[in-house]
Amino acid sequence: MNALTVRDLSKRYRGGTLANDRISLSVALGEVYALLGPNGAGKTTLVRQVLGLLKPTSGAIAVHGVDVVANPGFARRNVGFLPQGQFHMEMARIGEVIHSMARLRGLPTAEAKRRAEAVIARLDLEEFRKTPHFTASGGVKRLCGLASAIVGGQKVLVLDEPTNDVDPVRRQLLWGLLAELRADGAAILLVTHNLAEAERVIDRFAIIDRGQILREGTPASMRSLVTEMLRLELTPGFGFMPHPCLMPDQPNPGAYLFELASLTTVSAWLEEASTGGRVLDFRIGPPSLDDIYTAAVATPAPPLKAAS
Ligand code: ADP
């Protein structure tokens, strides 16, 4: 059974915005499912509904098979959650926040202590144990939020941008920890922009834009798209007009994606444009996963093949 199931979920806000438009996805125990998408795509709206904090307009959500639209309290008790942005805990110290969260999650005192200490050690937060939460850096607050999300041992975790502001060394700890949680059987719904790093732990992903899932697949299926695409960077000269085969690699000016099948056409065009001074210099290379993601979002009816 899937630990989290979302079926035909739609949310229209009072102002009329259709923030989620018939979204369906599922996350199994032992699986990391990433949600990728630009600002305003509808990710937070989806997450808030999964957590029972926002009522869907239509559709169904189940956590461990329980309908959380009818039982929002069940989701709040059974889902570990790292919200977007910072939360503020006034005078509490980092160590206290994590310990209190373990207790709030209903663990017996000794177990709460054991788990809180394990998480503090695992995320290398020992040196910040006594730091008041409100004076901690953004990255330490983020890690404290992650520690609080996982300390209760919930098997369904929703983590919204866990790496924001976190330093590279602790980001590695964080990805390692997510891999361990997955191996322990957690079902993790991960909202992230850090695709390059997240790729290590993602089992499946969905690219969401304007409230809809544009594509869903495994990192391998995304990689197979990469092998069919090339990336061109160029410096335009006077009279430059991009060839129709080229898709702008937004938001990078002067960068384009094109299909491998068009390489001969693009090469001939580049040679002519270089001779005519319309292209001053250029470089062709493989695109990154970020490029593919950008191309998918930039093109509502993507020329890329659907990921399986
Ligand atoms: P994301 O998390 O992907 O950035 P959101 O779910 O926050 O996207 O927003 C999706 C859309 O819903 C946006 O157009 C946003 O302006 C709109 N929206 C979000 N929250 C509200 C709200 N409380 N009332 C009205 N519109 C909202």
Image (tube, helix red, strand yellow):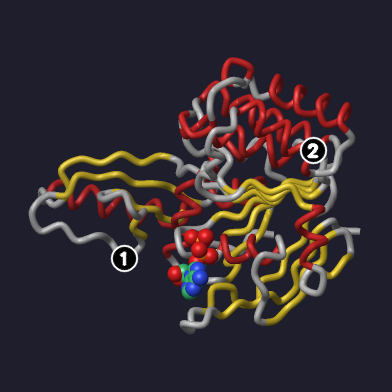
The three-letter amino acid code for the residue at tag 1 is: Pro
Left or right, residue 75 beside residue 260: right
Q: The C terminus lies in which quarter of the figure?
A: bottom right
Find residue 100 and name its label: none
- Image position of 264 (left or right of 225): left
Mark 2 or mark 1: which is in front? 2
| Residue 230 appears in the picture as rendered | yes
Outermost residue, top direction?
Answer: 127
Who is closer to the viewer here, 83 or 197? 83
| Residue for point 77% across, 23% down | 118
Q: Is residue 45 above or below residue 263?
A: below
Secondary structure under badge 1?
loop
Which residue has dot 2 on it?
103
How many numbered marks, from 0 up? 2
Crowding near pointer 2: few (<14 within 10 Å), some, many (20+)?
Answer: some
Figure check: 44 above or below 104: below
Gap between marks 2 and 1 measured at Cα = 60 Å
Q: Position of residue 174 (x, y in %)?
A: 64, 30
In this orientation, does residue 301 appear?
Answer: no
Report the quarter where the N terminus lies: bottom right
